[in-house]
Image (cartoon, rainbow, N blue to C red):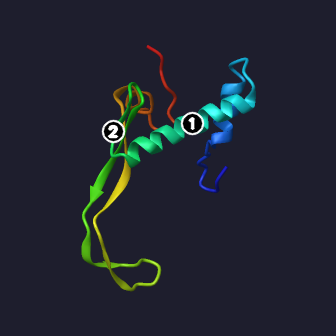
Amino acid sequence: MKADGISKVSKADIVDAIYGKVSTDRKDIQKVVDLFIEEIKNALVLDKIVELRGFGTFEVKIRKGRERARNPKTGEIVSVTAHGIAAFRAGRELKQDVWVLKGEKKKDN
């Protein structure tokens, strides 16, 4: 856990969680998770949109270049060309599931 109280979930944690729910070898689960992530990466590199219903959408957005930008580490003035960035947009179901603010308990109605 980090000092600010935010915990992280790693790829290994996800593999372990899946391993606890299915009767498949851990190595096979690791391979499937790695392949899944690789397929998302490959689609983005080919400028395709990856839509996972109920979860969200991964896509590449183009960020405009600038003649004058500042390197935050050195303060040096540099030029930045237009470039792609990976973006994620949460789907409706995911938005609804995380809507409750941290610290509040979800009320089942």
Q: Which residue is mark 2?
A: 49
Tell me how far mark 2 sits from mark 1, CA to CA. 17 Å
**Which residue is rendered at x = 48% and y = 38% of the image?**
39
**In the rendering, at what x and y percent does residue 91 appear?**
36, 31
Screen quadrant of the C terminus: top left
**Which residue is rendered at x = 29% and y = 70% of the image?**
81
Q: Relative to 91, say whether 84 is above or below.
A: below
Label 1, residues with CA under 10 Å away: few <14, some 14-19, many ≥20: few
**Which residue is rendered at x = 61% and y = 45% of the image?**
8
Mark on residue 35? 1
| Mark 2 / mark 1, whichever is N-terminal | 1
**Which residue is rendered at x = 46% and y = 44% of the image?**
41
**In the rendering, at what x and y percent does residue 73 appear?**
47, 79
Nearer to the camera, 98 or 28: 28
Q: Is residue 53 left or right of residue 21?
A: left
Residue type indicated by callout 2: Ile
Residue type indicated by callout 1: Leu
> Secondary structure under badge 1?
helix
Q: Relative to 42, say whether 53 is above or below.
A: above
Q: Residue furthest top?
A: 109
User: How many marks overall?
Assistant: 2
**In the rendering, at what x and y percent does residue 85 appear?**
36, 55
Q: Relative to 64, say whether 33 is above or below.
A: above
**In the rendering, at what x and y percent does residue 9 appear?**
62, 42
Q: Are marks 2 and 1 in contact (CB under 8 Å)?
A: no
